[in-house]
Amino acid sequence: MEVSETIQCPFCGQSFDLTVDTTVSSQRFTTDCEVCCRPFEVAAECEPGAILSLDVLGS
């Protein structure tokens, strides 16, 4: 089950929606900002159908 959450780019500060597959309980992945295109890491803790925590990890 996928859930969308609004996140903020750690580089340009713009907000955009990120879709997370909540069937994976603990995950870390890299995504690109939809505005400035810079890659950054995201860490998510989930349970099916819900995002428990979502951390944006940038430099």
Image (cartoon, grey):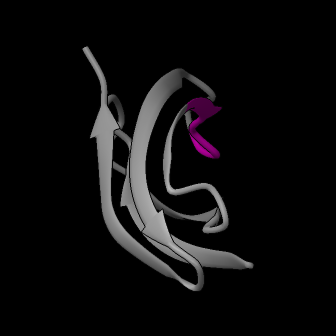
Question: Residue visible at 36% across and 36% down?
Answer: 12
Residue 30 is one of the magenta-drawn residues: yes
Indicate the quadrant where residue 39 lies.
Answer: top right
Is residue 47 shown left or right of residue 18?
left
Give the magenta-colored segment's residue range.
29-35
Quadrant for the C terminus in the image: top left
Question: Which quadrant would residue 30 be assigned to in this image?
Answer: top right
Residue at the farthest right position: 1
Question: Compared with residue 1, is residue 8 higher up or lower down, i.e. above or below?
Answer: above
Q: Determine the residue positioned at 58% across, 79% down.
A: 48
Front-most of 49 and 57?
Answer: 49
Question: Image check: 20 left or right of 13?
Answer: right
Residue 45 percent across, percent down from the top left:
38, 56
Using residue 18 as the reference point, say whether residue 13 is left or right of it: left
39 relative to 36, above or below: above
Residue 8 included in the magenta stretch of the image = no
Image coords of residue 29 (percent x, y): 57, 31
Looking at the image, the residue that sits furthest to the top is 59
Q: Name the residue: 30% across, 23% down.
A: 58
The image shows residue 34, relative to residue 10, as above or below, that is below
Q: Quadrant of the N terminus?
A: bottom right
Q: Position of residue 16 (x, y in %)?
A: 52, 63
Q: Residue furthest bottom?
A: 49
Q: Position of residue 38 (x, y in %)?
A: 55, 22
